């Protein structure tokens, strides 16, 4: 099976993800902390460096889930040192150095700038501290990587956007691409995946990078696109994530657009799910953050405790960074989120309750699409 077909198969198979790590058992990984002779005991410190707060997932899901899972894996003896860089690469470098100085046993790193952080990763390596790249592939001598299949994310976005447009338009339909941050290597992969679906089937009239993933930057760029192209000449907007989509939609509405074109997203943020319910946003990409976060915590604990069999079972993929090849990795599958499968994804997986989504403002829209408890 080709890589491309494998990704499509994964996407289809992922439509009803579970958040349990029972899947790890299928991989032959052990979830307990008593079944090996660990290099270190349960009294371990896991450093967690997250990149920003503009995307609500980091504070709402990643940090609390990793903290809870580390505690469960270490009988409440392990702790998580947490720092958020708030989109500041220099601040994150300082935070990483602090964790090295504090002698963290292992560090989960979600880089603001994957290239700039490489020196810090090298320093951690010299101090004997393993670094696992979390969600974004950092450069430098990292020990492992866990993220979603990022090119697949872009493919799912591009494919779903074409479906919203009614298929192949012969390349005449104009769209705008609002990509992610140029310092985030994931953004390049999202874009590559999307272009593999969109090239030759639509005309990409304008394409922008969104500095820092900030919605206000996306809004400003979309305003430029509207002024240059005319709102009526934009058939759809590819947005790399939900924050970007929110900025784009604000720009369209500020320009007086009432019949919004299809807009993509990613991350299944609550605001985005509500926009999907109301029809303002066409789709998002649902990624099981609990699955990613729990597996990352399991990888970190296994690595520092010397549980090689468990660690290998959790990292059966491999990836290359600009500085290192064949990095052990785990690529978590994704699924397109539309009005049709909200119940089967974010609700079924316990990310949101229907009552969270269907507030008074969205009650009638929820009823119209049959979304109910």
Image: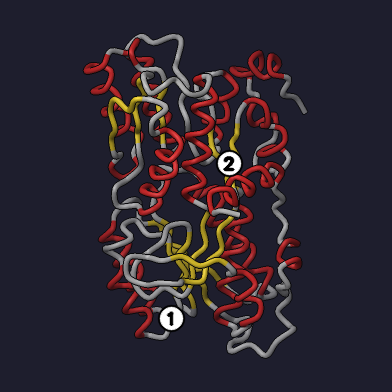
Could you classify mark 1 by the number of other residues whose Cα lies within 10 Å: few (under 14), some (14-19), or many (20 or more)?
many
> Height in image: 160 above or below 73?
above
The location of residue 75, given as percent across then percent down, is 70, 75
Residue 123 shown left or right of residue 353 in the figure: left
- Quadrant location of the N terminus in the rendered image: bottom right
Q: Nearer the viewer, mark 2 or mark 1?
A: 2
Relative to 63, 142 lies left or right = left
Residue labelled with disc 2: 286
Tell me the SS state at disc 1. Answer: loop
Q: Residue 196: which quarter of the image?
A: top left
Q: Residue at x 28, y 13 (%)?
A: 230
Check disc 2: other Cα within 10 Å, few if <14, some if 14-19, many if 20+: many
Report the residue marked by disc 1: 129
Residue 54: x %, y % from top left: 40, 42
Q: Is residue 361 above or below residue 270?
A: above
Write down the quadrant of residue 37 in the picture. bottom right
Task: Please indicate whether residue 76 sits to the left or right of residue 319 in the image.
Answer: right
Quick one: 123 or 155, which is closer to the camera? 155
The residue closer to the viewer here, 42 or 324, is 324
Residue at x-position 32% and y-position 70%: 323
For marks 2 and 1, the one nearer the N-term is 1
Quadrant that contains the C terminus: top right
CA separation in Å, label 2 and label 1: 32 Å
Left or right placement of residue 88 versus residue 10 in this view: left
């Amino acid at each position: 099976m080709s890589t491309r077909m494998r990704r499509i198969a994964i996407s289809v198979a992922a439509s009803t993800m579970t958040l349990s790590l029972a899947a790890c058992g299928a991989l032959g990984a052990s979830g307990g902390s008593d079944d090996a002779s660990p290099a270190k005991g349960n009294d371990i410190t896991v450093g967690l460096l997250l990149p920003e707060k503009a995307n609500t997932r980091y504070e709402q899901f990643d940090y609390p889930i990793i903290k809870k899972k580390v505690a469960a894996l270490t009988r409440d003896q392990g702790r998580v040192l947490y720092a958020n860089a708030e989109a500041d690469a220099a601040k994150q470098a300082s935070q990483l150095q602090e964790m090295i100085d504090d002698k963290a046993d292992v560090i989960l790193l979600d880089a603001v700038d994957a290239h700039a952080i490489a020196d810090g990763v090298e320093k951690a390596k010299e101090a004997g501290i393993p670094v696992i790249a979390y969600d974004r592939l950092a450069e430098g001598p990292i020990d492992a990587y866990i993220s979603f299949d990022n090119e697949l994310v872009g493919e799912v976005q591009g494919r779903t956007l074409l479906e919203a447009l009614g298929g192949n338009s012969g390349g005449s339909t104009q769209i705008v691409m609002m990509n992610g941050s140029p310092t985030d290597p994931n953004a390049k992969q999202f874009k590559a995946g999307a272009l593999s679906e969109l090239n030759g089937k639509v005309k990409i009239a304008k394409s922008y990078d969104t500095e820092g993933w900030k919605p206000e930057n996306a809004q400003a760029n979309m305003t430029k696109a509207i002024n240059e192209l005319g709102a009526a000449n934009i058939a759809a907007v590819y947005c790399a994530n939900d924050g970007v989509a929110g900025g784009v939609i604000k720009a369209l509405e500020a320009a007086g657009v009432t019949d919004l074109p299809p807009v993509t997203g990613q991350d299944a943020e609550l605001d985005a799910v509500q926009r999907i319910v109301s029809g303002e946003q066409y789709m998002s990409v649902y990624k099981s953050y609990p699955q990613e976060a729990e597996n990352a915590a399991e990888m970190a604990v296994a690595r520092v405790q010397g549980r090689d069999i468990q660690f290998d079972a959790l990292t059966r993929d491999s990836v290359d960074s600009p500085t290192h090849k064949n990095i052990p990795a785990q690529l978590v599958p994704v699924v397109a989120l539309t009005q049709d499968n909200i119940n089967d994804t974010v609700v079924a997986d316990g990310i949101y309750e229907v009552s969270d989504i269907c507030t008074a403002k969205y009650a009638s829209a929820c009823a119209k699409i049959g979304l109910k408890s």
